C-alpha cells in the first residue's frame, strides 16, 4: 500500500520496526464523527458540557477551565471514556489539537470537534498522542483547507488522507507509558516554573505598593503642563503604510513593543503635527477591559514622532515631575485604583475621561526623592524582568522537550 503523506509529514515510514505497519487514520478506527453546532449555550452549568476547541489545550489535554453548556435534548451525540477528540476547525496554527477523553460523564461536543473511536488494537492514548504530535510539528497547518480567518480538516480527510502508524499493543503500551512518565516530569517542572512566575508578579506588586504607600498631597491635574488630549481616530483603510502609530496592544506595564514593529497609518501633515508624541509624554489607556484600563507608558526617545490612537490620551508633565515616577505610580495597585475609581462601564469594556485623570490623587515628593525612588524601583523591576526572561526561556524549552519525547518514540525524520 502506497501512503501519500502530504506536506511536512514528520515520521519516517521507511524506518519503522518490522512488526509495525502504516495506513490512514480511518483504517484503524470504528467511527469518525463531528459534533453538532449550537448557537444557544450558557456558562452556568445548565444542561450538558458542549466541548469546543478551547477545551483541548496545547499540551494535548482536555481543559475544563471554560465550559459552555447546551440543553440535553439539543443532540444525542456524546463522548465516551477512551474516545479521542480532534479539533477539526480553528486557526491554521491550532487546527489539529487532539486529546483523549479521560473523564467520564455526559459530554457533548461541537461541530468544530471530531470524535474518533479507535479499534480494539489501538490504545486511545497512543492514537491521541500521535495525532497531537502531528499538530505540534505543524503537519495540519500545511494539510488543512484554509477559509476566511480559519482552517479545517474534514472527517473524510482525517479518515482517508492522514497517515497513521500502528504498533503492536505491547509496543503501544510501552510507548504510552514512557511518554506519560516523561510528560509527568515535564508537567511538574513547568508547574514549578509557573509558580515562580506567579511569585515574581506578586513581588512586583509588593515593590510598587511599598514605593507608593503615602497619603496623596496633590492631583495629577496639578502636575500637567499640557493635555490631556485624546488620540487620533482613522479608519482601517488608512492603515498599512505611513507614520508609526501606538495602539493599546503595543504596551503593557513595564513592556513596550519595538518601534520598528508598530503598525503604520496614512496621516496628513496637520494630523501628524497635532498627534505626534514627544519624549516624556505620558500616554494613558482610556478605553479597555477593566483589567487593562488605565495602563500607561512614558514616551522614550524611540517613540518620539509616533502617533497615538483614539482609545488613549496623552499629557505632558511639568518639569518638577518625572514622567517615569507618574508612570510607575499609575501602574501600581493604589495608583490604578485611584485612576479608575470613577470609570464608566459599557458592554465588555470600561472607560475613563480627561477629568478622571486630572482628579486622580497622587503623592509627589521633591525631585531628589523621585529620582531615588525611581532608581530603586527600576533596579528591583530589572531583576524581576531578568528572572522572568529566564523562566520564559525554560518554559519554551519545556515545549521543545515535549516534542523531543514524542519524536523519539514515533521515529521521526530528524
Image (cartoon, rainbow, N blue to C red):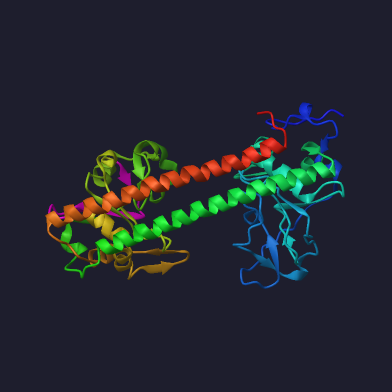
Judge whether residue 94 is colored magenta: no
Q: Quadrant of residue 159?
A: top right
Compare residues 228 and 177 and report the one nearer the observer: 177
In the visual, does 346 lie left or right of 43? left
Residue depicted at 54% across the width and 54% down the height = 191
Position of 130 relative to 17 (above/below): below
Q: Residue furthest top?
A: 14
Residue depicted at 36% across the width and 50% down the height = 384
Residue depicted at 47% across the width and 64% down the height = 348
Q: Position of residue 216 (x, y in %)?
A: 20, 69
Residue 184 visible in the shown view: yes
Q: Position of residue 314 (x, y in %)?
A: 27, 53
Residue depicted at 12% across the width and 54% down the height = 368
Q: Position of residue 53 (x, y in %)?
A: 65, 53
Q: Point out the stretch of residues depicted in magenta.
A: 306-324
Position of 160 relative to 216 (above/below): above
Compare residues 221 and 237 and report the one nearer the observer: 221
Quadrant of the frame with the C terminus? top right
Compare residues 196 and 249 and report the one nearer the observer: 196
In the visual, does 211 lie left or right of 94? left
Residue 154 visible in the shown view: no
Compare residues 32 and 151 and report the one nearer the observer: 32
Count of marks overlaid on the render: 0
Q: Position of residue 171 (x, y in %)?
A: 80, 41
In the visual, does 394 lie left or right of 368? right
Position of 345 relative to 140 (above/below): below
In the visual, does 374 lie left or right of 13? left
Quadrant of the frame with the N terminus? top right
Amino acid at each position: 500500500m502506497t501512503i501519500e503523506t502530504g506536506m511536512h509529514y514528520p515520521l519516517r515510514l521507511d524506518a519503522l520496526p518490522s512488526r509495525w505497519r502504516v495506513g490512514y487514520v480511518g483504517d484503524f478506527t470504528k467511527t469518525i464523527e463531528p459534533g453538532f453546532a449550537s448557537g444557544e449555550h450558557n456558562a452556568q452549568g445548565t444542561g450538558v458540557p458542549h466541548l469546543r476547541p478551547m477545551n483541548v489545550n496545547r499540551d494535548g489535554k482536555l481543559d475544563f477551565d471554560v465550559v459552555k453548556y447546551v440543553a440535553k435534548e439539543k443532540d444525542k451525540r456524546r463522548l465516551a471514556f477512551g474516545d479521542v477528540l480532534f479539533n477539526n476547525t480553528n486557526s491554521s496554527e491550532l487546527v489539529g489539537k487532539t486529546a483523549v477523553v479521560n473523564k467520564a460523564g455526559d459530554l457533548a461536543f461541537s461541530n468544530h470537534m471530531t470524535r474518533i473511536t479507535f479499534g480494539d488494537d489501538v490504545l486511545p492514548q497512543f492514537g491521541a498522542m500521535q495525532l497531537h504530535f502531528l499538530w505540534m510539528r505543524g503537519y495540519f497547518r500545511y494539510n488543512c483547507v484554509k477559509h476566511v480567518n480559519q482552517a479545517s480538516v474534514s472527517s473524510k480527510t482525517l479518515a482517508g488522507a492522514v497517515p497513521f502508524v500502528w504498533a503492536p499493543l505491547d509496543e503501544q503500551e510501552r510507548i504510552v507509558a514512557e511518554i506519560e512518565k516523561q510528560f509527568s516530569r515535564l508537567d511538574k517542572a513547568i508547574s514549578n516554573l509557573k509558580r515562580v512566575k506567579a511569585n515574581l508578579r506578586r513581588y512586583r506588586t509588593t515593590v510598587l505598593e511599598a514605593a507608593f504607600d503615602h497619603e496623596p498631597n496633590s492631583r495629577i491635574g496639578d502636575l500637567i503642563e499640557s493635555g490631556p488630549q485624546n488620540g487620533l481616530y482613522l479608519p482601517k483603510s488608512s492603515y498599512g503604510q505611513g507614520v508609526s502609530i501606538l495602539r493599546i496592544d503595543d504596551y503593557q506595564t513595564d513592556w513596550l513593543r519595538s518601534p520598528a514593529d508598530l503598525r503604520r497609518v496614512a496621516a496628513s501633515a496637520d494630523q501628524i503635527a497635532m498627534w505626534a508624541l514627544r519624549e516624556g509624554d505620558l500616554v494613558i489607556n482610556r478605553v479597555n477591559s477593566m483589567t487593562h484600563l488605565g495602563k500607561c507608558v512614558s514616551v522614550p526617545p524611540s517613540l518620539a514622532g509616533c502617533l497615538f490612537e483614539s482609545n488613549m490620551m496623552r499629557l505632558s508633565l511639568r518639569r518638577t515631575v518625572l514622567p517615569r515616577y507618574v508612570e510607575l505610580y499609575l501602574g501600581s495597585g493604589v495608583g490604578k485604583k485611584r485612576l479608575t475609581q470613577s470609570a464608566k462601564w459599557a458592554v465588555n469594556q470600561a472607560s475613563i475621561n480627561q477629568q478622571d485623570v486630572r482628579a486622580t490623587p497622587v503623592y509627589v515628593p521633591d525631585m531628589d526623592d523621585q529620582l531615588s525612588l525611581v532608581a530603586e524601583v527600576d533596579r528591583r523591576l530589572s531583576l524581576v524582568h531578568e528572572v522572568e526572561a529566564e523562566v520564559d526561556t525554560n518554559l519554551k524549552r519545556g515545549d521543545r522537550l515535549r516534542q523531543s519525547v514524542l519524536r523519539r518514540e514515533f521515529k521521526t525524520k530528524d
